[in-house]
Image (cartoon, grey):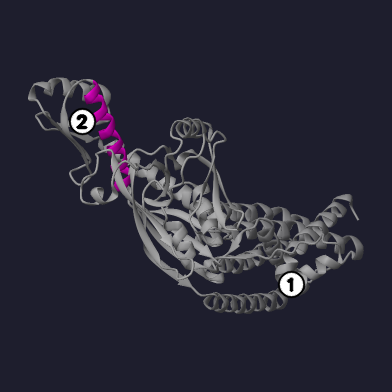
Amino acid sequence: MKSSTVIKLFVVLGVILIFGLYALPTLIGQKNAKYLSQITGGYLPTSTINLGLDLKGGMHLVLGVETDKAVFAVLSRAANNLQQQLTNAKIAADEVVPSVKNGYTIKIHLVDDADLNRALNLIATNLPNYVVVSDKNPIIIKLKDKIVQRIKNEAIEQAISVIRNRVNQFGVTEPTVVKAGEDHIVVDLPGIKNPNRAVRLLGETARLELHLVDDSVNVADALNGNLPEDDEILYQIKRNPTTGEVTKIPIVVKKEPVITGDMITNAAVRFDNLNRPYVAFELNSEGAKIFARFTATHIGKRLAIVLDDVVYSAPVIQSAITGGRGQITGNFTLEEAHDLALVLRSGSLPAPVKILQKVTIGPSLGKISIEKGKKAMIFGAAVVVLFMIFYYRLSGLLADVAMALNILIILGAMVMLNATLTLPGLAGIALTVGMSVDANVLIYERIREELMIGRSVYDAVNTGYARAFITILDANITTLIVALILYQFGSGPVKGFGITMAIGLLANIFTAVTFTKMVFEIVLDKFKPKRLSI
């Protein structure tokens, strides 16, 4: 054999071995693959193809992000800063009120109309993102439209990032988290085993704050409306470990938080001396400095640990905490502690989200889809195999072997890439089966044409492959570009179709051009036939 043929033979055998080993667990079952791996020293792959939501079952969610609340948070911070700036400039204002309903505005009511021009100059200097809608008292300023849109877009992108982090830590294989429309997020969770827990985790804003408890204020008086301006009433939830009964305890805290959740760098579940779970968290350098300075000057005071406006605990500060570490206790179950640590690690949502649509797909539907997909592929492949053998005889049988190798490469590559097989992905595999045979049909017809004009068998094979190669390459490359675009910009099932198509097309080029030609070269070199069965 020629050296080029020997090289092709080793390449083909290597491809069959590598992709065959990765495809083996899918073909024989993961349990059998694990047993086989154990008896061979644990070197064989044991992973099977990941199944998508439409095949494995799971949950499909459409979340709506309340972007107006993200804008309101920006308006509120601007109003607070403006109130402080007016006070520093000795401009009395008895009302600085942010509003979303009135077109993302802030209303400033001055005590003395004589301060109007000074207030307008201060606003123009310090609030460049706002335009003055009314320059009379009360002054009304509006957040610029482009700034509003930017805040909303950033809220969506940040929400997608946070939700994706939570889903990844939740242990779901190949989840989908993508933006849909103006303010919607689509989440697909294949194989999810606890849908209610997933919904709870994805919907929690997880805004952690540490507030100083104002014990100087009588709670009963505060509930009756006698509450200082810089205070607010929050509630601590306590559960009776025996009866499970929940009670709400009002606590008066300072509005301004000492520490916010964006300063947290890590959170994990720990256990106390009584083996009760709690959540330990770590702060970044800025948060650690603030926390150390605050606790050193407030020894003996209570610090409320607040998550989404609910007080989880309010321990007394015993001493300065200088390590940048704290803990959250609250009679958690182990699952609740793990979930709380998870959402703290992944970060807080920039705005609340609502579950707009929730669809749970049972695994039985996926099994039916798989069975129908298998039957369709087997029937289609059988028809193609019989046709190729009938029309091209032994050469048709070679094309059928190439088709089987094509499927083997697709299965093995999807396991290697940890890709997800969806129902459209099954259609993509079926389509590449037809395209792999189509490539061989092009080659065989070229060879027939060369034989008809009197070329020798050897020359006809070489010329047929050479002339068909460009056509095969052009057809597959253009389709491959489309498949890659589907994978890049599609989501869920569409992405599944794109990945199987892309892998199948690359496998098709290899099997049609390298594998079948190598077999022809070996046959021609060894047997030197005068005719071809084609």
Of the pair 51 and 313, the residue shown nearer to us: 313
Q: Relative to 329, is 126 above or below?
A: above
The answer to whether residue 199 of the structure is visible from this angle is: yes
Which residue is depicted at the point 74% across and 64% down? 46
Q: Residue drawn at (35%, 59%), measured in percent from left and top?
A: 248
Element under disc 1: helix
Where does residue 439 sit, x and y in percent of width and height? 66, 62
Classify mark 1: residues with Cα within 10 Å, few (<14), some (14-19) or many (20+): few
Quarter of the picture containing the C terminus is bottom right
Magenta includes 87?
A: yes
Q: So how many labels did they put on this image? A: 2
Kindly identify the residue that appears in the image at 30 percent across and 36 percent down.
77
The residues bearing labels 2 and 1 have C-alpha atoms spaced at a distance of 67 Å
Determine which quarter of the picture holds residue 388.
Answer: bottom right
Quickly name the residue at label 2: 131
Badge 2 marks a residue whose secondary structure is strand
In magenta, the rendered stretch is 68-88
Q: Is residue 139 left or right of residue 60?
A: left
In the image, residue 512 above or below residue 193 = above
The residue under label 1 is: 31
